[in-house]
């Protein structure tokens, strides 16, 4: 039988989790009874109809078992089940995330029913979180479920009869198939076709037996994450294969872990577009938060350092930790203080807490308010700033269940403020979270927060390499530019050294320092230098950033340089394409303040504009603001013209490493010369941090070998031969699936290099070969429905542009058909040939069938019929027949060109008109134009930006379409409805 998806991966998952070997049913028996382990039941044993999501008998049994009031009157269980069914059905109205959020309230015991004495409301328990053996855990495979259509997920896992996990297995032996194919099936197909199945969902997973990834409902595939084993420091190569996937499966899907994720690590938040989203933890957030919780529970050690690399999700780690600490009864309602050291970070952290609807969160606006809250013994989550501890009294609160989580713990925590905080809260737990720990004599994060008992001084550590490996953040590419504008360290006076060694300067401090260093300021801000840099930025941005849909930040030496850069940039881009974000001081001239001052509200508005892909704002120009705590995934390139060092530098450049659709790296373009000596710029004791920057010169060195590897699949193929002969020879060189996948793997690597380097001059040498490889790749790429997401991926903007600018070799397939164009028709007209005329006649008949329903082609078709009748009756000569035929052919070609032009315009109405004409039947009204106009006007009324990603938007548009097609025009054709809705989704 060999290896396939079913026997090698799906059955392996079942065996790992339940002990049952479906490849050899006699080898093991299912485990019976209740217990904190998974028990296998085949789909046939589940005793349910194809429309049922829950195993209602098991749900009822659990309700009776876990609720004394229901145990006394088992009929009450039916009332609860009725309520649960209502939530499942509501998914079509409220959307999947809201339905999941509502069901979670039932699952976590937040819902009550009037089952107590005198109709008193009591909590309803569907799951026992305290004694896990009181729950029933079932795993099944090939779970058939019907809603709009029937789907059969590979793995479904149920707790007390409620499906909480869906898994998809893929074949382990086809290189182009990966876990992504399974994730795509879950996310794009199952979640839309059978949404009820996902209403109680904790998480879904996908694996091809090499890697395991998981995600929450409606989580885009780029944010699915791998699960790592705690304290597993082995090399990534050792992790591949069934054995490692099995360990990860057992760890992630252990009932205790799943229930912990459900109860303490599932958040429902609102994104920037006001859409409800669900967030579950990545491994490092889960592990880090639990280590904090465990240390507090144990109570012996009072501090800990969590080093998680910039961009790997520390804000959510703090939310998860705070939420779990607050819920723990043994901690007796603790106070959790989240401390930040900048107002912009205060906004980011409190924004994260507020968006996630975490209960009992207070943000303090003054020192007095914070001190008052602590003196009054407030038991909540308090978000505050470290400087609000200035002049705090000793022993302000001596409780030992105060937990302080300090964000960005590398900065001010070691000074007087840190000591005052410790004196004010002598018995508190202190945890420092940082992406950039400092280990120097004068500033030592390890001393302040690290415990000697923790290996290396860390309670939890998640390095740059971990975050890249797990796709939590993106690699950073460093690109030195215009060496002649770099700071010349020999000739600029010694004040430069003082400037270079400063860290975390405010706008005003940077100005003052620049004034002290007059020579350097004159050099940095000389109009010729700024003009040259901005010209280079404009060219670089238009060629390497803009085509991909990304945005950029420019970091300048001081506030006045920001203005200089803005005025210069306006020569190349519209004024609204860039904004300056700086603060002004009381000493600034009135005119300067009036023109450039940005208050907190304006700054938030600018950040929202910047994060909006459709907004014309493409550059933010700063000197100190937004270098930390600024989360803009669309930011891909930072143009750096300022001296930064150590954690300030690392924090700043990591603004570019956030995940975003089609973004494969963050880029730092260095005009200052910061990275002329990268080792000195990043003076960390940790070797791994020094490796953060990958220089583009290294990528250039890799290009020749990558090109050679991709071309090696076509040895003996003459790449100069054009047309179908050349393409056929190339395709014959990679006949088998294995050969195609091997080529795709090498081409993928080459393509990534190409996109990173474009438009570097080094590419010119390889341009012809790359163009040829790209065309071959396109010609053998599987159809989109059968797309292996790992290797057969969509091409980058530069590669696509290159292909579009050149003839598609793939088009040669059309040569087998009779080409119908003006030259061919003219040739037949001038040299009447019966054979060619017959061929032309057949082509025309075929074309008219294709355009059936279009009045213009109908008229031409009727003329052709009349002409054939005349010829058959002998009313015209063969030459006259051919010439008349050619006239009809010419008009057909012209009509097709006009139609193509209309379709190319991609106007929504043109697209819909084409669709209705194509699908028109005898039952369909002839008033196509009226139908299309009605649809167009009503859809334009109900739609709104981003409606395609909103359940509410989709429902309103579908409802409007039904009103027109079904109610007004009485067209109850489901195919037509589906196709029309598809067009509306694409074109509106």
Image (cartoon, rainbow, N blue to C red):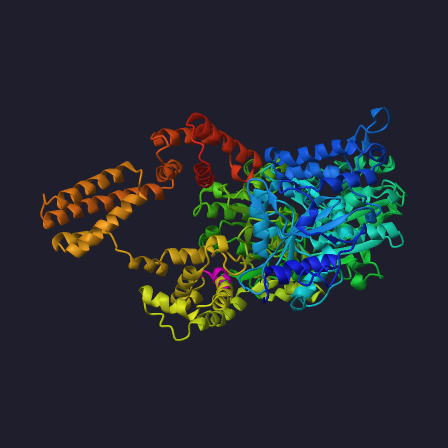
- Quarter holding the N terminus is bottom right
Q: Is residue 494 visible?
A: no
Of residues 931 and 80, the one nearer the viewer is 80
Left or right of 369 in this view: 506: left
Camera-nearest residue between 143 and 321? 143
Q: Is residue 311 magenta?
A: no
The image quarter in which residue 932 lies:
top left
Residue placed furthest toward the bottom? 716
Instruction: Tell me the quadrant of the picture where the C terminus can be found.
Output: top left
The range drawn in magenta is 752-759
Q: How many marks?
A: 0
Evaluate whether residue 506 shows in this view. Answer: yes
Whole-percent x and y of residue 333? 85, 40
Residue toward you, 970 or 591: 970
Work out whether 556 lies above or below 701: above
Task: Indicate the position of residue 760 as horizontal and vertical percent values.
Answer: 45, 63
Magenta stretch secondary structure, dominant: helix
User: In percent of the image, x 65 and y 37: which residue is there?
Assistant: 88
Q: Position of residue 320 (x, y in %)?
A: 74, 46
Image quadrant of residue 52? top right
Above or below: residue 439 compared with residue 220? below
In the image, residue 755 lies in the stretch drawn in magenta = yes
Point out residue 665 in the picture as x, y percentages from the top left corner: 56, 57
């Amino acid at each position: 039988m060999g290896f396939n998806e079913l026997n090698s991966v799906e059955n392996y998952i079942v065996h790992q989790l339940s002990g049952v070997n479906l490849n050899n049913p006699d080898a093991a028996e299912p485990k019976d009874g209740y217990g904190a382990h998974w028990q296998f039941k085949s789909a046939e044993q589940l005793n349910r109809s194809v429309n049922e999501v829950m195993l209602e008998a098991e749900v009822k049994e659990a309700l009776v078992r876990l609720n004394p009031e229901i145990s006394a009157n088992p009929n009450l269980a039916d009332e609860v089940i009725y309520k649960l069914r209502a939530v499942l059905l509501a998914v079509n109205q409220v959307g999947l995330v809201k339905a999941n959020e509502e069901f979670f309230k039932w699952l976590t015991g937040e819902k009550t029913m009037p089952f107590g004495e005198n109709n008193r409301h009591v909590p309803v328990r569907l799951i026992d979180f305290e004694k896990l053996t009181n729950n029933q855990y079932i795993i099944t495979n090939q779970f058939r479920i019907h809603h709009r259509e029937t789907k059969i997920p590979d793995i479904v896992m149920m707790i007390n009869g409620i499906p909480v996990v869906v898994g998809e297995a893929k074949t382990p032996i086809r290189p182009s198939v990966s876990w992504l194919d399974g994730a795509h099936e879950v996310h794009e197909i199952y979640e839309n076709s059978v949404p009820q199945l996902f209403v109680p969902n904790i998480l879904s997973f996908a694996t091809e037996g090499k890697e395991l990834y998981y995600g929450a409902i409606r989580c885009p595939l780029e944010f699915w994450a791998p699960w790592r084993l705690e304290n597993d420091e082995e090399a990534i190569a050792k992790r591949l294969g069934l054995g490692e996937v099995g360990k990860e499966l057992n760890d992630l899907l252990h009932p205790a872990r799943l229930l912990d994720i459900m109860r303490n690590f599932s958040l429902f938040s609102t994104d920037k577009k006001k859409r409800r989203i669900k967030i579950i933890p990545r491994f490092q957030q889960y592990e880090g938060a639990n280590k904090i919780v465990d240390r507090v529970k144990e109570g012996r050690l009072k501090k800990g350092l969590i080093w998680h690399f910039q961009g790997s999700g520390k804000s959510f780690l703090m939310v998860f930790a705070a939420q779990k600490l607050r819920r723990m009864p043994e901690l007796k309602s603790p106070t959790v203080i989240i401390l930040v050291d900048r107002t912009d970070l205060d906004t980011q952290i409190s924004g994260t807490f507020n968006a996630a609807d975490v209960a009992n969160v207070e943000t303090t606006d003054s020192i007095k308010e914070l001190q008052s809250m602590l003196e009054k013994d407030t038991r909540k989550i308090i978000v505050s700033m470290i400087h609000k501890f200035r002049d705090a009294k000793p022993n302000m609160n001596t409780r030992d269940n105060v937990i302080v989580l300090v964000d960005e713990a590398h900065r001010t925590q070691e000074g007087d403020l840190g000591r005052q905080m410790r004196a004010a809260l002598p018995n508190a737990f202190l945890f420092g979270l940082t992406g950039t720990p400092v280990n120097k004599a004068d500033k030592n994060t390890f001393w302040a927060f690290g415990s000697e008992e923790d290996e290396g001084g860390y309670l939890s550590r998640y390095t740059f390499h971990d975050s890249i490996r797990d796709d939590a953040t993106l690699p950073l590419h460093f690109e030195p530019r215009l060496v002649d504008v770099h700071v010349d360290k020999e000739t600029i006076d010694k004040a430069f050294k003082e400037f270079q060694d400063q860290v975390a300067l405010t706008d005003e401090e940077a100005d003052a320092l620049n004034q002290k260093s007059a020579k350097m300021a004159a050099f940095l801000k000389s109009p010729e230098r700024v003009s040259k840099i901005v010209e280079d930025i404009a060219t670089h941005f238009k060629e390497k950033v803009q085509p991909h849909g990304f945005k950029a930040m420019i970091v300048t030496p001081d506030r006045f340089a920001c203005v200089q850069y803005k005025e210069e940039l306006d020569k190349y881009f519209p004024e609204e394409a860039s904004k300056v974000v700086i603060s002004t001081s009381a000493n600034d001239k009135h005119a300067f303040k009036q023109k450039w001052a940005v208050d907190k509200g304006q700054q938030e508005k600018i950040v929202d504009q910047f994060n909006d892909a459709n907004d014309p704002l493409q550059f933010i120009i700063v000197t100190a603001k937004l270098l930390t705590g600024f989360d803009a995934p669309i930011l891909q390139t930072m143009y750096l013209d300022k001296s930064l060092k150590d954690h300030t530098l690392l924090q700043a450049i990591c603004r570019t490493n956030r995940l975003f659709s089609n973004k494969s790296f963050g880029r730092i373009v260095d005009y200052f010369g910061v990275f002329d000596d990268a080792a000195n710029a990043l003076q960390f004791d940790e070797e791994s941090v020094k490796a953060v920057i990958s220089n583009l010169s290294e990528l250039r060195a890799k290009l020749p070998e990558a090109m050679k590897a991709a071309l090696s699949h076509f040895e003996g193929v003459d790449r100069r031969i054009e047309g179908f002969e050349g393409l056929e020879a190339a395709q014959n060189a990679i006949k088998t699936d294995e050969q195609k996948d091997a080529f795709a793997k090498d081409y993928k690597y080459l393509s990534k290099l190409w996109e990173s380097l474009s438009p570097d001059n080094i590419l010119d040498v390889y341009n012809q070969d790359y163009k040829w490889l790209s065309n071959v790749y396109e010609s053998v790429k599987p159809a989109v429905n059968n797309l292996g997401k790992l290797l057969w991926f969509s091409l980058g903007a530069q590669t696509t542009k290159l292909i579009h600018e050149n003839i598609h070799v793939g088009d040669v397939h059309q040569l087998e058909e009779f080409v119908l164009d003006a030259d061919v028709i003219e040739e037949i007209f001038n040299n009447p040939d019966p054979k060619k005329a017959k061929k032309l006649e057949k082509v025309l008949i075929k074309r008219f069938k294709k355009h059936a329903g279009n009045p213009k082609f109908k008229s031409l078709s009727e003329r052709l019929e009349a002409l054939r009748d005349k010829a058959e009756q002998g009313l015209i000569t063969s030459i006259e027949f051919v010439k008349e035929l050619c006239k009809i052919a010419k008009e057909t070609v012209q009509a097709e060109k006009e139609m193509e032009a209309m379709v190319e315009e991609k106007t929504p109405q043109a697209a819909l008109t084409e669709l209705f004409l194509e699908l028109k039947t005898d039952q369909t009204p002839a008033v196509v134009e009226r139908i299309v106009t009605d649809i167009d006007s009503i859809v334009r009324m109900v739609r709104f930006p981003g409606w395609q990603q909103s359940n509410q938007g989709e429902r309103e548009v579908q409802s409007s379409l039904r009103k027109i097609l079904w109610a007004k025009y009485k067209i109850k054709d489901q195919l037509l409805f589906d196709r029309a809705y598809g067009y509306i989704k694409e074109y509106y």
